[in-house]
Image (cartoon, rainbow, N blue to C red):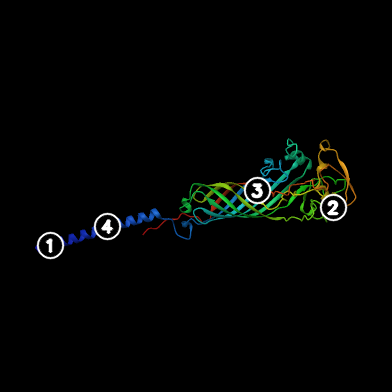
């Protein structure tokens, strides 16, 4: 009997020890799992370490800064000539603060002396109005831009920050083609071979003497044709807002600093109108002051071209070869501003659940 009682007590003690050991093990495992849950950031190499791709669609507003602007200022632009642009993008996020975006954008720049010139500015506004140049330029650009977030996204894409300001800078390669509308006739009434109002490509015409054999004493001597393919530096600021688990809304304003002064086909001096030879269209597109309403044209003064011996009538200071007869300002490169709203969607995004063991 004593042996039976002793055996029962030993068995009870052993069971109690096993239960206590199991409880201690469970408490340790729960603490361990809780620690894992508090520090979990997902699987490496995927969405969990904050690396993901996103596609986007953007709508932008383009504004031009250059020679055909209301004032000769780097910050002068005509808001009424704001034109839309559309873009498609692919973004790769590298980590908590950094993203790289490749984008294609298509849009139009536009300017007009008559519509934009500030005639209240007796010196610059009157000059620009009487110059009477205009253009449009359809821009096709490919960009590669780095984005730097202010607020760190230290979790998975699912729990990314609700919003963050950002700055960006990159490189742009773009194709441009300045155009202007043809007048009804040439300077001396010649037929131009195109209907009035037709949009004409300006680069092939060499409106500042790029295609002519200029004398070494001419103001534009040594001028060369510009390229339709150019490079620019994009930079700016913006903010990104989380819409839901897989979509973001971006809003930013930036500038494209170009390395060309010919987005508007205007940069240097007027040339002798005779250098265009028998190309009446090139001559008419180079000097356009005679197209102003008759009551707004100052007294025309005739001059005989030193190149072809033909007489032309122009406003003094325009349409003639002289170092002081400026058509544009070669000292400043052209710039365009891009204000963008972009919607992006994270590719391959699914809800990821952690597994704890």
Please say if the residues under marks 4 and 2 sit with CB atoms less than 8 Å apart: no
| Disc with the residue nearer the chain's start (4 vs 2) | 4
Dot in front, 2 or 1: 2
In space, the residues marked 4 and 1 are separated at their CA atoms by 27 Å
**Mark 2 — residue?**
275
**The label number, if any, that marks residue 108 in the structure image:** none
Dot in front, 4 or 2: 2
Query: From where the camera sits, is residue 1 visible?
Result: no
Check disc 1 and report its element: helix, strand or loop: helix
Q: Is residue 149 left or right of residue 221?
A: left
**Mark 1 — residue?**
6
Q: Quadrant of the C terminus?
A: bottom left
In space, the residues marked 3 and 1 are separated at their CA atoms by 92 Å
In space, the residues marked 3 and 2 are separated at their CA atoms by 38 Å
| Disc with the residue nearer the chain's start (3 vs 4) | 4
Mark 1: give few (<14), some (14-19) or many (20+) Cα within 10 Å.
few
In space, the residues marked 4 and 2 are separated at their CA atoms by 98 Å
Front-most of residues 210 and 252:
210
Check disc 4 and report its element: helix, strand or loop: helix
**Mark 3 — residue?**
85
Q: Is residue 29 left or right of residue 319?
A: left
Mark 2: give few (<14), some (14-19) or many (20+) Cα within 10 Å.
many
| Disc with the residue nearer the chain's start (3 vs 2) | 3
Q: Position of residue 256 (x, y in %)?
A: 64, 50
Q: Position of residue 151 (x, y in %)?
A: 49, 49
């Amino acid at each position: 009997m004593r042996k039976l009682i002793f055996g029962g007590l030993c068995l009870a003690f052993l069971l109690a020890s096993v239960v206590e050991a199991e409880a201690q093990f469970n408490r340790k495992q729960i603490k361990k799992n809780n620690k894992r849950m508090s520090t979990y950031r997902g699987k490496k190499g995927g969405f969990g370490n904050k690396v993901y791709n996103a596609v986007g669609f953007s709508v932008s507003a383009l504004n031009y800064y250059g020679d055909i602007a209301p004032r000769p200022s780097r910050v002068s632009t005509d808001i009424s000539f704001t034109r839309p642009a559309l873009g498609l993008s692919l973004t790769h996020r590298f980590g908590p603060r950094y993203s790289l975006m490749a984008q294609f954008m298509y849009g139009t720049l536009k300017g007009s002396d008559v519509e934009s010139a500030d005639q209240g500015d007796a010196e610059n506004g009157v000059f620009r109005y009487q110059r009477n140049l205009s253009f449009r330029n359809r821009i096709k650009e490919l960009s590669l831009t780095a984005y730097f977030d202010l607020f760190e996204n230290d979790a998975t894409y699912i729990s990314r920050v609700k919003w963050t300001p950002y700055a960006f800078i990159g490189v742009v390669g773009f194709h441009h083609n300045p155009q202007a509308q043809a007048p009804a006739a040439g300077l001396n009434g010649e037929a131009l071979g195109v209907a009035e109002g037709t949009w004409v490509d300006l680069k092939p015409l060499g409106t500042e003497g790029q295609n002519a054999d200029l004398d070494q004493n001419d103001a534009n001597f040594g001028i060369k044709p510009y390229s339709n393919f150019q490079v620019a530096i994009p930079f700016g600021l913006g903010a990104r807002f989380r819409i839901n688990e897989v979509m973001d809304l971006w809003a930013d304003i930036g500038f494209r600093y170009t390395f060309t002064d010919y987005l508007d086909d205007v940069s240097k001096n007027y040339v002798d109108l005779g250098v265009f030879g028998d190309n009446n269209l090139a001559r008419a597109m180079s000097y356009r002051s005679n197209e102003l309403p008759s009551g707004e044209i100052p007294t025309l003064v005739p001059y005989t071209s030193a190149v072809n011996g033909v007489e032309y009538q122009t406003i003094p200071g325009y349409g003639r070869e002289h170092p002081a007869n400026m058509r544009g300002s070669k000292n400043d490169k052209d710039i365009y501003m891009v204000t963008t709203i972009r919607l992006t969607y994270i590719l391959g995004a699914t809800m990821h659940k952690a597994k704890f063991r």
